[in-house]
Amino acid sequence: LGNAVVVGDRVRLEPGTEPPVIAEVAPRRNAFARRAAGEQVVEQVVAANLDQVVLVSALDRPAFSPGLADRVLAQAEHAGIPARLVLNKTDLGAPERAAGLLAEYERAGVPCHAVCAVSGDGVEPLRHALLGRRSLLVGHSGVGKSTLLNRLVPGLEHLVGDVNEKTGKGRHTTTAAVLVRPAPDLELIDTPGVRSFGLWGVGALELEQAYVEFRRFLGECRFTDCRHGAEPGCALRAAVERGDVSRLRYESFLRLRAELVDEERSGAARPRRGRP
Ligand code: GDP
Ligand code: ZN
């Protein structure tokens, strides 16, 4: 079915068909997409009609990746979907390290949760943030997303694990998302752990707008086409130097934009709509 029908879509079924046949897909209020893994430049709509995107990361093993975090946050912003950041495995480092990292994202306006899926620390406040909303969970393989899900919803492992198994976790296969509703007020859409996450619909030029906390500085640079690198009179860099914008976010922005520029130059990123 590809992008024509994705997890979270509302559909009308053709009456009296077995197996069921989808007659109609309701218009989406939003959709979270990515560039599909692999050589081809195609869109992969991961899920639709979401209330929030929850990025699950780890303090260590694997090390926290601002690259992935900022891509997912940018993609959510592009789609107009609120996002939050979960930092798992907080038992693997000093509390100050976790707090320092999350402070960077709190300053960027991203609600954050420090958790330990093994001990259960911090899981209750996270559960509250999930209640009454449809949440898409995204994370690198190995960050402990399955362990965390099982903490949140004991027994969920079986539901989600089976699907991950079939899609070949971590391999270059189609990433399937699966929606579970373990309680009436809890809707989680889990995705297999990713190795990399390619942006879709956000190019080098649009990227700065997807870093929400940058926006108020963007019009203030001396040059209207400022790239916020070494240009004199760059208001964004000045904000970083004053401590008004996180250096971690700024540096990941520069790296990510450089990558997008390279891709666009090589022609690799000429967008083609995913096959319907
Ligand atoms: P997933 O690939 O994101 O689903 O990760 P898993 O849930 O399979 O966890 C990967 C590894 O990390 C497993 O060995 C878990 O036991 C371990 N793990 C998960 N959460 C934590 C945590 O909070 N602290 C520590 N130390 N290890 C964890
Ligand atoms: Zn600038």
Image (tube, rainbow, N blue to C red):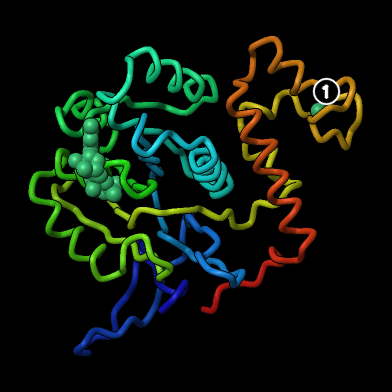
Which residue is at 51% across, 78% downward? 276
- Residue 5's x, y, as percent? 40, 72
Report the front residue among 219 and 173. 173
Quadrant in the rendering for residue 40: bottom right
- Name the residue tied to disc 1: 234
Which residue is at 26% across, 27% downward? 115
- Residue 101's x, y, as percent? 45, 22
Q: Is residue 25 above or below residue 112?
A: below
In this rendering, does residue 239 appear at all? yes
Q: Is residue 15 above or below residue 41?
A: below
In this rendering, does residue 148 appear at all? no
Asked if residue 170 lies left or right of residue 76, the reply is: left
Dot 1 falls on a residue whose secondary structure is: loop
Total number of numbered labels? 1
The outermost residue toward the left is 155
- Residue 17's x, y, as percent? 22, 90
| Picture quarter with ligand 2 | top right
Quadrant in the rendering for residue 7: bottom left
Which residue is at 50% across, 58% downward? 33
Q: Residues within 10 Å of mark 1 (few under 14, many from 20)?
A: many
- Residue 250's x, y, as percent? 65, 28
Quadrant in which the N terminus appears: bottom left
Q: Is residue 249 above or below residue 17?
A: above
The outermost residue toward the bottom is 17
Q: Amino acid at mark 1?
A: Cys
Which residue is at 29% across, 85% downward? 21
Q: Is residue 52 above or below residue 196?
A: above
**Is the distance from the Cβ of mark 1 to the nearest ligand 2 atom less than 8 Å?**
yes
